[in-house]
């Protein structure tokens, strides 16, 4: 790294360092602070005075110490070696650092994000003489057993291929030489760099038309997210935000998963780091880490690095999106990121907004979420890729009227509102079906009707109607008791309870129930709605409500979610037949 002009420290305030003599530096330049070479980034310029947020512990710094500018913005290294990697908020490889410095991060340590020694086998897919532009694929590297890493021409380059080599090489070796329009040579390696605060270019954005299937019934059936969509999971402490995001990272039908632990507790990231390598990906049969990138920036790490971590993660996600992959990014949580913004804003003595957050909180959140989407890549042969962003929000006391939650809700199109009351009842996922919503539900209905079953949207509407009616009847029950309800209303309450307990309740740690295919979800909805419709018909013909609600087949309906995928058709037919027989028997006894 070349260090250019230098200044000197005039003020140290926690992670904020002010340096004078920095007139030649630019906003967002990366700097090295003091002889310890602490890494930082310029976030404000006033004359020759630069305000720098330092991504490492600043204790011991003194005024007068030197500050060196690199003249480059904060960038990430993009190339083979990202998959399976565990990085901090500024893309330092934590496993490599641990080998060098032990369990604690050493200040000023410099380790490249991508290994310079590891060799990769490069297979070209263009020939000498071909004309290529930014985004075109030059060749491939088999990074893991499940990820084929496509080596692309950097977005700013174009020219004629003069040399291209096949074989093993490191990320720093030259694999191709282009000749631009002026006859100048342009060298390309396996690795490219990209500024984290600048979105990678694409040809055009496409409409979200297909769902990101997660295997979580309350999400897929009631509040689906599209591939390329944005969702928020707000909820109080203990309501299951992290477990829900872990489930989405494990089971969502995405080619690549980028998980950002942004300011959350260290034990939660430890769970991720310990669990993901051992998990078998149901889509590939390999370890989940073979398609995962982890960004770990826990609450005990320098606060300023939280601000960079989500940009680091989404830039890596965009890189894989440009290859034509479907990428799912989990940010846990944007509230901790916003707290870092608030702290730095306070130290810069900016005018505070609501609850002390900076006035630009909403625009910064929008800049982050707007980088999601289903896009057509640049290049001669465009590829279709998708980047879905799911951000957890941790409002203090579960109050979603606070600024971060409200700013997020103005941007995202899916709201999975976690409810502490449901969590206390041990109903997980604790997504409240009365307050949550998905603005993708109507546009994705056609996909579900075409690819799963023509009844999907009707069954979804019936279930939502039953849950809404239950909420209305609960107010009456609180006043006069269940016995005051008519048989029809009582049946509605029982059917809605079946929806809640048998369909929406899902055990993340159960071997079978942790993931439910769309076909199985369809059959489960049919069983619950079928019970309601047939029982209503039985009531209309004089059936006894007590006998109907206590039929043994209701236990079979409840346990259908634990049936193996291979046996669901047989089990469905048996339960449907038993339901018809028991309803007929109940009616016959009534007639007698």
Image: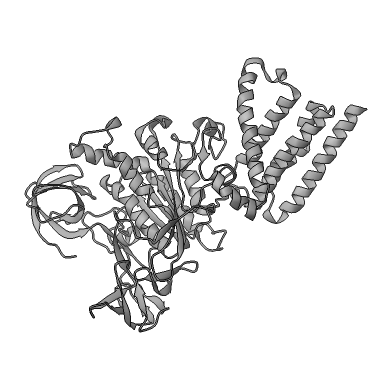
Provide residue 112's location: percent of width, then percent of height.
28, 64
Residue nearer the viewer, 270 or 410: 410
Provide residue 156's location: percent of width, then percent of height.
29, 67
Residue at 52% over, 30% down: 421
Q: In the rendered image, which quarter contains the C terminus?
A: top right
Residue at 54% over, 42% down: 223
Q: Quadrant of residue 459?
A: top right
Using the image, determine if residue 181 lies above or below residue 19: below
Residue nearer the viewer, 156 or 248: 156
Asked whether the viewer can see residue 83, the reply is no
Provide residue 7's location: percent of width, then percent of height.
8, 53
Using the image, determine if residue 271 lies above or below residue 591: below
Q: How many marks?
A: 0
Provide residue 440's location: percent of width, then percent of height.
52, 45
Residue nearer the viewer, 464 or 515: 464
Side (left or right) of 217 relative to 65: right
Side (left or right) of 279 relative to 259: right
Q: Extreme right residue here?
A: 592
Using the image, determine if residue 416 lies above or below residue 543: below
Q: What kind of colouring is applied to the model shown?
A: one colour
Q: Quadrant of residue 181?
A: bottom left
Q: In the rendered image, which quarter contains the N terminus?
A: bottom left
Asked whether the viewer can see residue 172, the reply is yes
Residue at 31% over, 47% down: 306
């Amino acid at each position: 790294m070349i260090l250019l002009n230098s200044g000197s420290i005039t003020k140290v305030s926690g992670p904020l360092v002010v340096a004078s003599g920095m007139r030649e530096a630019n906003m967002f330049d990366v700097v090295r602070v003091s002889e310890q070479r602490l890494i930082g980034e310029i976030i404000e310029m006033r004359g020759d005075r630069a305000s720098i947020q330092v991504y490492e512990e600043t204790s011991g710094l003194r005024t007068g110490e030197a500050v060196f500018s690199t003249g480059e913005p904060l960038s990430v290294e993009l190339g083979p070696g990202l998959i399976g990697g565990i990085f901090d908020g500024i893309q330092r490889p934590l496993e490599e650092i641990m080998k060098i410095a032990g369990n604690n991060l050493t200040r000023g340590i410099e380790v490249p994000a991508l290994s310079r020694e590891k060799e990769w086998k490069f297979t070209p897919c263009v020939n000498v003489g071909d004309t290529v532009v930014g985004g075109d694929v030059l060749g491939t590297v088999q990074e893991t057993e499940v990820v084929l890493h496509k080596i692309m021409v950097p977005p700013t380059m174009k020219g004629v291929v003069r040399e291209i080599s096949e074989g093993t090489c490191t990320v720093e070796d030259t694999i191709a030489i282009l000749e631009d329009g002026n006859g100048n040579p342009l060298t390309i390696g396996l690795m490219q760099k990209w500024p984290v605060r600048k979105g990678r270019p694409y040809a055009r954005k496409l409409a979200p038309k297909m769902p990101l299937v997660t295997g979580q019934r309350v999400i897929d059936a009631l509040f689906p997210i599209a591939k390329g969509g944005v969702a928020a999971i707000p909820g109080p402490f203990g309501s299951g935000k992290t477990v829900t995001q872990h489930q989405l990272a494990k089971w969502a039908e995405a080619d690549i998963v980028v998980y950002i632990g942004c300011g959350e507790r260290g034990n939660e990231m430890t769970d991720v780091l310990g669990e993901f390598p051992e998990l078998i990906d149901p889509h590939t049969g390999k370890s989940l880490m073979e398609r995962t990138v982890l960004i770990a920036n826990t609450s005990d790490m320098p606060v300023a690095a939280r601000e960079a971590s989500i940009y680091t993660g989404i830039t890596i996600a965009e890189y894989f999106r440009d290859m034509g992959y479907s990428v799912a990014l989990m940010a846990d949580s944007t509230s901790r990121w916003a707290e870092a913004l608030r702290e730095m804003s306070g130290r810069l003595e900016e005018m505070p907004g609501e609850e002390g957050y900076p006035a630009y909180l909403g625009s910064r959140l929008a800049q982050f979420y707007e980088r999601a989407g289903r896009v057509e890549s640049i290049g001669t042969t465009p590829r279709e890729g998708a980047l879905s962003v799911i951000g957890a929000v941790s409002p203090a006391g579960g109050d979603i009227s606070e600024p971060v939650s409200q700013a997020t809700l103005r941007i995202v199109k899916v709201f999975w509102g976690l409810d502490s009351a449901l969590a206390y009842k041990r109903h997980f996922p604790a997504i409240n079906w009365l307050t949550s919503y998905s603005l993708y539900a109507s546009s994705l209905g056609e996909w579900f009707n075409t690819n799963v079953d023509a009844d999907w949207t009707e069954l979804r509407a019936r279930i939502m109607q039953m849950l809404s009616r239950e909420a209305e009847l609960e107010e009456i029950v609180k006043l006069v008791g269940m016995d005051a309800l008519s048989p029809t209303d009582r049946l509605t309450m029982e059917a809605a309870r079946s929806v809640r307990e048998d369909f929406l309740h899902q055990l993340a740690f159960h071997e079978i129930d942790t993931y439910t295919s769309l076909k199985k979800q369809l059959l489960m909805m049919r069983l619950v709605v079928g019970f309601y419709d047939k029982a209503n018909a039985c009531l209309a013909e004089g059936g006894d409500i007590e006998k109907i609600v206590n039929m043994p087949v209701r236990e079979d309906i409840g346990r259908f979610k634990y049936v193996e995928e291979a046996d669901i058709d047989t089990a469905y037919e048996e339960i449907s037949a038993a339901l018809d027989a028991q309803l007929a028997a109940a009616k016959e006894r009534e007639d007698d």
